[in-house]
Image (cartoon, rainbow, N blue to C red):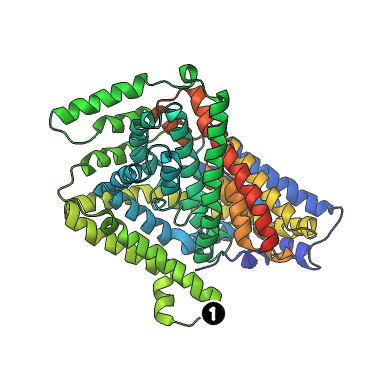
Amino acid sequence: MGTVNVSLLTTDPCSQAFSAEGPTIGFPHMQDIAVLINTAVAVLAAVLLIVRFRVNPVIALVVSSVYLGLAVGLGVEKTVKTITAGFGDIMVDVGLLIAFGVLMGSILNQSGAIRRLVEHLLNTFGPKRLPYTMGLAIGTVLQSIFLDVLLVISAPLARKLAPKIGKLGTARMATAMAIALECGIVFTVPGVASLALAGLLNVPLGKMMLFGLLLVIPTIIIAIAIMTFLFRRGFWNEAKDEDHTFVAEEDREGEEEEYDGGAGRPVAAGTAARGPGTNGTAAQVTGSVAVAEREPKQFPLIVLFAPLLTSLLLIGAGAILQILKIDLPWLQLLGEPVIALLIGLIGTCLVTRSAIGQKRVEEAIAVGFKESGQILILTGVGGSLAATVAAAGLGHILGGFFSASTVAPLLVVWAIAAVLHIAVGSVTLSAITAAGLLAPIAPVIGLDPVLLALSAGAGSLFMVHVTSNTFWLLQSLLGQSVRGALKSVTVGVSVASVVAILLILPMSLLF
């Protein structure tokens, strides 16, 4: 996998001032203080532009990067080169991976495989274990799908299955979905944020996948169990926390459509379009789901998911070969993440073409390209800000502060990501920014970058609230009031955030 070469971005005189004698411990120099202040101003300015003035995050991040570069003395030419190099480096690392993953997810969505998998989980494990089984499925094997797409696909099914659980069904299913969706994108390869974090911190993708799975599975299970305990102790009030008026009307309209011969849920698309904080992409994809339910052929689920599973197995095999230092060139080639996901994408296209036809595969690919574009640009400019921060020399300054401990940086990166997420509302953006701020200190103190990546991801989960369109999608599509969503989504995912960092800290002592 490629690298985000922050070392090349720290060769300017300003950075050399911090690195000539290594990280200093003790009271910072005035020049160090200036760098710290300007970095804080740049990050806070980005947050203010996005939240208060509704500036597009891409524009806000670039503006903040320009300010920081000029403020710390990089100069015009060096600032521009750093911003563009940061964007380019992160795209080298994760651009194709994100595109291939989103395309596979869009095609699987069109084939109806996701709906059938959830139904299979219900039949296999029963209603009592449904929140856990559905949560683990969403948080692991379904992470090739763009978050909003996966949410809109699974929410109507979760809403219909909630009554089968019994009392507190809506609360438990809503919480399980929120925790699994958010944890999956930051911990599980090929989740968008996990790919971006791995690229930004130069973590081998196979290693990110293995460590991410070790973390995400217990995090989801423990967080759901804690929230279930709270709900059963009176934390949930069905009268005030549930509001089924809107979704009940939607369900009735969907049933009328089926009665008239339509197969699917076109109303769900309208719902996504009307929901606060949503965008046309989610609505468009939901419309695709309606089409996807009219399947000409019922291929076995294992056949539909086989290409995706094969690509993940190849990545895992490549990581194991690297760890064991075994030289098998042909398997190393197939285990390269770009090649493995390309194999998965080609296989998914071939299998689903036989199931739903070439035309609908092409439609799914078109939708996938629209989704991946916005993710790629946002990820790239996040890398631009991180590169500018590295060039400013912040890593050497912070390296001196944290050189005595490997635990403190993990808590700091968790806290920074949490604060950024509270303000901005973007899990991916806050994780990338926080990781980029502390990325340069990892080699200085001997900290494994994968732990830094996981800590940034964990912090970015804290306080999913009204600035997040995921919050509004879960609120509107699962029959909750805003008060209910604050409990199931905001509190639920925050519990997962705390659980994750508490699991990461012992890992830092072992690895």
Residue 393 quadrant: bottom right
**Placement of 108 over or under 55, stated as above or below:** below
User: Residue at the location (79% across, 53% down)?
Assistant: 32
Q: Give the farthest residue toward the left.
A: 261
Q: Position of residue 141 (x, y in %)?
A: 40, 53
Q: What element carries label 1?
A: loop
Going by the numbered disc 1, the residue's amino acid type is Lys
Q: Which of 310 and 301 is in front in this view?
A: 301
- Residue placed most toward the observer, 386 or 78: 386
| Residue beneath disc 1 | 325
User: x, y percentage for residue 414?
Assistant: 65, 47
Badge 1 crowding class, 10 Å Cα cut-off, few under 14, some 14 to 19, many 20 or more, is few
Q: Is residue 481 above or below residue 346?
A: above
Q: In which quarter of the image is the C terminus?
A: bottom right
Whether residue 76 appears in this view of the structure is no
Q: Give the side of residue 495 with respect to residue 304, left or right.
A: right
| Position of residue 130 measured from the top left corner of the image (x, y, whole percent) | 41, 40
Relative placement, left or right, of 336 versus 210 is: left
Q: In this view, does 236 lie above or below 451?
A: above
Which image quadrant is residue 314 in?
bottom left
Q: Which residue lies furthest to the right in this view?
A: 27
From the viewer's perspective, tell me whether residue 214 is left or right of residue 242: right
Q: Where is residue 327 in the image (x, y as percent from the top left)?
A: 48, 83
Q: Nearer the viewer, residue 84 or 502?
A: 502
Query: Which residue is painted at 74% across and 49% down in the image?
Result: 36
Decide if residue 319 is in sight here. yes
Question: Which residue lies at the image location 67% right of the left edge and 61% below the top edge?
Answer: 440
